[in-house]
Each structure stands twice: as C-alpha cells, then as structure tokens.
Image: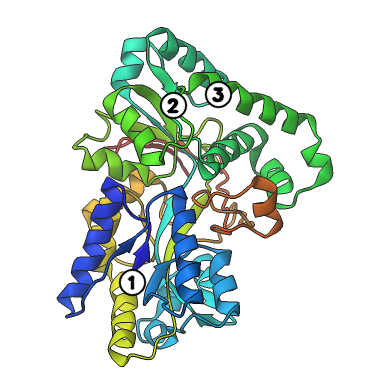
Amino acid sequence: MLHWWTSGGEAKAAGALKSTLQEKGHTWKDFAVAGGGGDAAMTVLKSRVVSGNAPSAAQIKGPSLQEWARNGVLASVDDVAKADHWDDALPKVVSDIMKYKGSYIAVPVNVHRVNWLWANPAAFKKAGATVPTTWDEFFVAAEALKKAGITPLAHGGQPWQDLTTFEAVALGLGGPDFYRKALVQLDAATLKSPTMEQVLTTYKKLKPYTDRNAAGRDWNLATAMVIKGEAGMQIMGDWAKGEFIAAGKAPGKDFVCTPAPGTAKAYTFNIDSFAMFKLKNEANVKAQRDLAGAIMSPAFQETFSLNKGLHPRAHGPEDGQVRRLRQGLGHRFHGHRQGRHPAALAGPRHGRALVGRRRHQGRGEPVLEFRQDDGQGRDGQDRIGCKEQVT
C-alpha cells in the first residue's frame, strides 16, 4: 500500500484502514512516503511501475488517475462497485472522477474542504485580536499577533502550500467567477485585471508575517506551531484538524477554524482516493477487492473520518459523531446542486507550478465547488470549533 499519510492524524487514519484489512485476513505491507504533499510518493510510484513492481494499491489524486488509466496499468473495480451500489452511494461529481471510460478504476476515501483558516484562541487573546473573516481583518490581526511576539501565520514554503494560500487569497478577494476565469480557464484579460493585481499584492504582503524558517517546512509542522501557540493562524485544508485532535486539543477551546478570509460563501474541495494496479496473483487481487469494499463501508468511513478530520465521501446513514463532524467542517457533500458551480481545479496537495498545473488540468484533484449563499444563511460555531456559512 503506497501512500503519504505520515503525519499524526493521517497515520491514525491509515492505521484504521490497515486494521480493517487485517480483520479480513490480509497482510498489510505499508509503503508510506513522506513529503511534498504527495510529490515524493508519486516519484516512487512511477519508479516501481516502470520497473514492473507496482503496488497492489496506491494513493492517487484527480487527473493523475486518468493518466495512469490511459497507460493501461490500473485494474477495474466495477464488480465491487456494482455489488455495493457505488453509483447510488456517491455524488456524481465524485464518481465521475473515479471512473475511466465509464469504469471505476479507483475508490474514493474522503472529501476534503481546502479553504480553512485555523487559529489558536489563546494566541489571539494574548494579542487582543479577533479571528479574521476578511483580508483587511487578517492584516489587522496579524499586526496585533506580531506585536505580541507571536508568529502571525504558520506556513510551509512548499509549492503546494504556497498555491493553497494563493488560491485562498484569489478566491477571497475575487470570488468564484474571478477564480474560475483566472486560475482554471487562464483567461488573459482576467489575469491582467486590477483584481489580479490586488490578489498578487495581498499575497506578497503575507510573507513578512511568516517566520524565517518557513521554507521547505511540512504542513503538519506548521500546524504544530499553531497547536503550541507559537503561531496564531494557518491556512490549510480540513486535514489539519486531525493534527489538533492527535495532540489532545479540544475543538472550540484550544483551536478554532473558519473559512479562509472572504471565502465563507465558497467551498473548494479535493478527494483522497486509492487506485488498484493490475496484478496476476489471485490472492492479491482478492485483497484489492476487499480493500475497495472496506473503504466504502460506513463503519470504516466513520472511523477514518473522525481520525483525519474530514467529510465521509458517500451518502448514507451516519451516527452522531459523524454528523457533528460534518456540521463543523462544512455541509454534507452532495456534488452538483443549484447554486454550486463545479469547475476544473488543480488539487492543493500536489506541488506543481501554478501555470503548469492549470494547463494540464492539474496534477491533483480536478474539482472546485462553489456554495452560494441563498440569503437564508447563518453563521454558527459548533462543538468542532469550525465556523461555516450554512445555506
């Protein structure tokens, strides 16, 4: 099993999957590759496949699934999908990504919301600051934190983290239409617009509020700075919640999260998934099928999601814990709906240059969903400590 879940919360989530497979009588050979938001893992995967030593399954995102499928190395899991009614369980926007020429070639594990701002309440109290909801408020809070001797923004200077932050700025200042035209369609007029100039200027202003050791830092180490109160804020996807929980921190007390400044009415997401490679050993093929079925099971979804801090990927029954998780990290994920506008998006956890990722429809997750407020929304903060626009 090749993956890059190596941080505290992610490792617990991977452990849940390992236990599920072992209960079915299979042997789990862990091949975890840390670093780069998945880049390092993809380098290892390509080497193994080219040398004829493909893993039984590998964590792969978005358009990369289609690239691997076109190379003829992925196995269909349609038999499991049909038996377990995946088409009924999954939102179409998710199932379409998992298919190649109409056949399932991967199984989705979860759905991540990306555009979150994480904050340490104690740090804000010490600085006499308020958690920001706009970029103007962000810089006011950052100044206050800096004066209090606290690093305002915890950041890891890796390409995918830089892009995650840039996308948050672009979406927060320009809104969904600007984001789509500029970063998905690469519309020349939009890229040269005054709004883009404002986005670039704002993004540049963030640098002085990070610390001198940010370059190359892994995302979970940046999260640890917020956990310890060394930094006040971090812009990161909902997977950061798993780090807070693994550190024994209480939601709403020791940490809070809110949509990244200006993005309360927009929702960007990506999907973790596992692809199965073509194998000849029948025992390993059976293990692949059992893995696919286990990932889609409600019991595993509950355990995994609570460990990793995210949305379960499918429709279906949920208990109180999962319901509270959904309420805190965003709405239940249903894909296409009136007022939401999916578009191509390069995923934030796979470091590539901005233009290159857009040109190739991304090397990460190709999905962007926008949630538009219908005027009946309300803001609320629940026991998870994550404030969200509810529509």
Which residue was labeled with disc 1?
296
Asked whether the beta carbons under mark 2 and mark 3 sit within 8 Å of each other, the answer is no
Q: Is residue 31 visible?
A: yes
Q: Rounded to the nearest whole Å, what is the CA distance between mark 2 and mark 3?
A: 12 Å
Q: Rounded to the nearest whole Å, what is the CA distance between mark 1 and mark 2?
A: 40 Å
* Residue positioned most to the top: 147
Residue ID at (83%, 44%): 188
Which residue was labeled with disc 2?
213
Which residue was labeled with disc 3?
207
Q: Is residue 211 above or below residue 179?
A: above
Which percent across, then down, holds residue 120? 33, 25
Asked whether the beta carbons under mark 1 and mark 2 sit within 8 Å of each other, the answer is no
Quarter of image, res 241: top left
Residue closest to the eye, 203 or 29:
29
Q: Is residue 306 visible?
A: no
Residue closest to the eye, 251 or 99:
99
